[in-house]
Image (cartoon, helix red, strand yellow):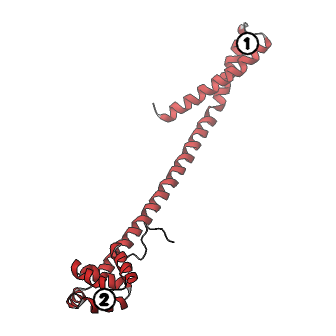
Amino acid sequence: MSPALSARRSCRLLGCVAAALLFGSAALAADDVASGVNRGLVESDAETFCANIGNAASDARVAWEARTLDALKADVEEKIQALDAKRAELAEWVERREAFRKQAEDSIVDIYARMRPDAAAEQLALLDSSTAAAVLIRLKARVAGAILSEMDAPRAVALATMMSTNGDTEDPGVAQQ
């Protein structure tokens, strides 16, 4: 049996029960319950009522289901849009990370690796932060540490922070003051 037929029968049965209760209470009020004539009248009125509202009840049920499905469809579309936005954000992040990595070409890294730490620190201090951090991240840890130790502390901290966050200028885990 299909769900639509089951819903129609349920609605008709509910309408029949409601009509029977309505007419049954009216019959009790008139104290004519024992009469067989009134019982026949109640049953025929209930059947008529059910027959009259059956189509309207099933149409209302179908309309309610259609509204529910439309709401669910809109919710799914909203979730898909949010997912697409997250996917675009991730693609942008990967692209930015790749650009950061490519900033420090091997030849530039080799030049700074062969310089004295104090001279390299002086030159890297004059570069923009993202380029300096990209060069430092590609150097061996010992060489990068020596260069950072020759820099003034605020600049060295800023570059170290940038290196640890893959080029982001802000660390999302630290609250801004």
In this rendering, the answer to whether 166 lies above or below 83 is below
Q: Which residue is mark 1?
A: 38
Number of marks:
2
Q: Is residue 121 above or below residue 137?
A: below
Position in image of residue 32 (x %, y %) = 76, 10
Q: Classify 10 Å Cα crowding around label 1: few (below 14), some (14-19), many (20 and above).
A: some
Q: Give the answer, above or below, for where 85 lies relative to 157.
A: above
Front residue of 73/89: it is: 89
Q: Amino acid at mark 2?
A: Ala
Measured as percent of width and height from the top left, residue 7 is found at 54, 33
Quadrant of the frame with the N terminus: top left
At label 1, which amino acid type do we have? Answer: Asn
Give the left or right position of residue 155, taking residue 6 as reference.
left
Identify the residue at horizontal 49%, vertical 71% (top origin). 176
Q: Which one is in front in this view, the residue at disc 2 or the one at disc 1?
A: 2
Q: Secondary structure at mark 2?
A: helix
Q: Which residue shows up at 33% across the image and 79% down it?
A: 100
Callout 2 crowding tier (Cα within 10 Å): few <14, some 14–19, many ≥20: many
Q: Give the label on residue 139, or none.
A: none
Work out how far the residue at label 2 is from the one at label 1, CA to CA, in angstroms.
106 Å
Asked if residue 86 lies left or right of residue 141, the reply is right
The image's mark for residue 121 is 2
